[in-house]
Amino acid sequence: MCYLQMRTLLFGAWVVFYVSALLAARRMWSGKYVRSPLARAALMVTNTEFTGHEVQEWYRCCPDMLGETVRPLFVQSQLDTDTQAFLQRSVEKSGWLFTQLYHSLFSTIFSPIVSRTSINGFLGRGSMFVFSRDQFQLLLQIDPDWKGERLLDLGAGDGGVTDVMGSHFREVYATEVSPPMKWQLQRKNYRLLEIDEWQRTGFQYDLISCLNLLDRCDEPLKLLQDIKEALVPGSGRLILAVVLPFQPYVETGGKWVQPKEQLQVKGKTWEEQVTNLSDDVFQKIGFEVEAVTRLPYLCEGDMNQDYYVLDDAVFVLRPQE
């Protein structure tokens, strides 16, 4: 028994020492000074690829394939300077060789017991990009100097997208379940609310953002209903991003499981699923679509890929009176 305890203690000490060494290496080598030649080459190539055919596909929509009620509400988006800047940073970070090695090893050790979101929060990596400031203003039809009272960002992550919206509001609230991501949000001085608290604060919100959360929560229909009741009557809006094709899974620890409440989204194409969400999901709950656009949901990459892309539909919804 003593021998087993000794082995456990030695293993624990080794893990602590190894992680400490990696943290020190990260501080020493996570800058621009260490980049693999392959990553430098990718950086130069990607500058031209940002305007290529593949990138243009991120924003492509066939309006004729949208339903009659959704077709006139489609807003055409395009690659802009803020999106290019995020892509450029992602390409550069993917070439920080020692940082990527550290991230890869840390994820391998802890992914069986810690969620991917929490690992990213602890490592300060995996930032997401949903829309730029210009795209956000275009969707909501607001001026750059427009101000609202309260914003609530559900599942805010590290607050990168919250920053884009937050400059337009006097009070910014956020929810997040991952403790490391909460630390990131607290560092930015956002007002954190628990996931079972934001519906019962005694006040309502001018804008609630629910970005790529609908396919990652246990009860998506209940969430939409709660959002509807928490918006300021008349003027309150929901900005909702959904990854399509819709494939719901819930992250629990290091595992992915099916949600308790099933939200069925019909259709094979992006346009068909957008129409189905608008006509058969949002309207039944009591939302009307004000605008919808197609945008890439971008995430910082790793040693294998400069950045990762998913296909988003971004809606602006208002509660029906």
Image: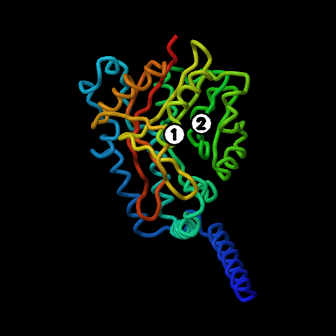
Pointers 2 and 1 in contact (C-beta within 8 Å)? yes
Q: Residue furthest bottom?
A: 3
Mark 2 and mark 1 lie on one chain; the one further toward the N terminus is 2
Residue closest to the eye, 105 or 88: 105
Q: Which residue is mark 2?
A: 154
Mark 1 sits on what residue? 213
Element marked by disc 2 = strand
- Report the residue at 72% width, 89% height from top: 3
Residue projecting furthest to the left: 64
Picture quadrant where residue 148 is located: top right
Residue 209 rendering spot, x and y as whole percentages: 56, 31
Q: Residues within 10 Å of mark 1 (few under 14, many from 20)?
A: some
286 with respect to 50 (left or right):
right
Relative vertical location of residue 5 with respect to residue 122 in this rendering, above or below: below
Residue at screen point 51% across, 47% down: 250
Crowd band around label 2 with a 10 angstrom C-alpha radius: few (<14), some (14–19), many (20+): many
The x and y percentages for residue 195 are: 65, 38
Residue at the location (69% across, 26% down)? Answer: 170
Total tally of numbered discs in the picture: 2
